[in-house]
Amino acid sequence: MKGFVIGGTSSGVGKTVATLAVIRALENDGLAVQPAKAGPDFIDPSHHEQVAGRPSRTLDRWLQGEGGIRRNYHRGEGDICVVEGVMGLYDGDGSSTAMVAESLDLPVVLVVDASAGMESVAATALGFREYADTAGRDIDVAGVLAQRAHGGRHTEGIRDALPDDLTDFGRIPPRDDLEIPDRHLGLHMGSESPLDPTALDAAAEHLDTDRLHAVARTPPAPDVAGWGGRATQATGGSADSDRPRVAIARDEAFCFVYPATLERLRAGAEVVAFEPTAGDDLPDCEGVYLPGGYPENHGSALAESPALDTLADRATGGLPVFGECGGLMALSQSLTTADGDTHEMAGVLPADVQMHDRYQALDHVELRATDDTLTAATGATRRGHEFHYSTADVASDASFAFAVERGDGIEDGRDGLTEYRTLGTYCHCHPESGAFDGFLDAL
């Protein structure tokens, strides 16, 4: 599958809107587009899925390593892959857009804000291309996509200023209906505030899809290693009755799930989804995964959900339960919103969670297991990321499974609050780290 990366000069330049317009333009040409996102984000990919109709792949060198990025890319399906970058092209010490493009040997289409410039757009793009040589990076900045650019003389001025070896891929016009509203944790999810299809079609008309398709390249083939550096469990011919059953919460409160995580779980288990906020009870299962999301926006529904009562009963009986960030919050004693409303949660983990108006942690994370736990043996490391607006007031005798080598964790450089066979972390782990290998082994 050929592809290219949509990089930006900075955060806020309009990469997501440009990516969605590119996806729509290529689809209008009859191509099946596989979207992807550089960095650990869950929100931009939800907008990709709304437009492309298929889950967006997560490509992050800190989480996955170069081999993991290539494996994850090649698990995608489509005629062409469009990878949205993160922040500015070269920004990010753990996994920048440039690192992802370099790992996959994909060209970069640079999004530049053209709202107040013409020749300066060309100068900016030239500077970004030349900086790759200065920094010793093997990055191919192939050309420019002008964001917030008017037509006529404005567009012609940008095109005329570009040197011959920088391609003009078109423009995104300045329109109020091409803005995605935001809130804490970033933009609204794609299912909540999708862009108007008519506006996307109008933007897509100004993109040169022939040039975009022509510049796309095929990345190097990945090695044959599976999840976490070992072979993935084979499932061909095995009945679901021969494998453990994993229940996954999937609703608006638990919506942060990497496609690769679902794929990894399905490779070793029968997976069944349930919706706690809709009144679903916990299905019969041998293990539970509660991903991140927005439990703070659904406190009342969760407090009344029969699933949390059943989960509490079964967890105290030894059922393996893994909760990440929002899952950790739902497993705690209580959840207090930023407005001061307190809701009773499952009460499995000895902590009370408080929401705040500002984010409390944002980083790539590395954890080292200080004891055998649900996702790692003693001494093993797991990588992920954290981004949350809450803090947890933990009981003085609480047990933690991980020391934090990088990041903040829950408290005092520790993460992985544990009780019975339940584990709750602020860290979102990618399956390439081996966390879900360990979870499946525990089942």
Image: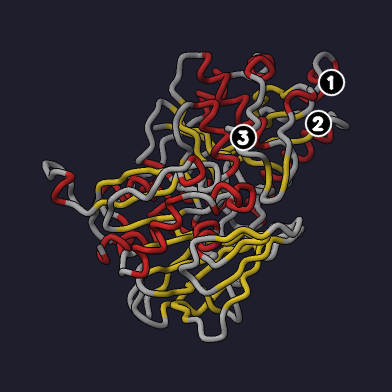
**What kind of element bears circle 1?**
helix
Distance in Å between CA atoms under marks 3 and 1 = 20 Å
Three-letter code for the amino acid on which mark 1 is drawn: His
Which circle's residue, 1 or 2, is located before the other in the chain? 2
- The residue lying at 49 percent from left, 56 percent from top is 61
Q: What element carries label 3?
A: strand
Where is residue 19? Give x, y as percent. 61, 31
Which residue in the structure is indicated by mark 3? 109
Residue 366 visible: yes
Q: How is the image coloured?
A: secondary structure
Q: Which mark is first along the chain, 3 or 2? A: 3
Mark 2 Cα within 10 Å, few/some/many (few <14, many 20+)?
many
Residue linked to disc 2 = 114
Point 51% across, 44% down: residue: 277
Residue located beneath label 1 in the image: 154
Q: Is mark 2 on a helix, strand or loop?
A: loop
Q: Are marks 1 and 2 in contact (CB under 8 Å)?
A: yes
Mark 3 residue type: Val
- On-image quarter of the N terminus: top left
Give the percent coordinates (x, y) of residue 363. 61, 63
**Residue furthest bottom as drawn:** 397
- From what the image shows, is residue 24 above or below residue 131? above
Q: Which mark is residue 175?
A: none
Relative height, residue 343 to residue 210 (above, below) = below
Q: Distance between the residues labelled 2 and 3?
A: 15 Å
Task: First in sequence, mark 3 or 1: give its number.
Answer: 3
Quadrant of the rendered structure where residue 342 is? bottom right
Q: Do the residues labelled 2 and 3 touch (CB within 8 Å)?
A: no
Residue 132, given in percent of the width and then of the height, sits at: 63, 51
Q: What amino acid is at disc 2?
A: Ala
On the image, which quarter does residue 351 sit in?
Answer: bottom right
Q: Nearer the viewer, residue 428 or 332?
A: 332
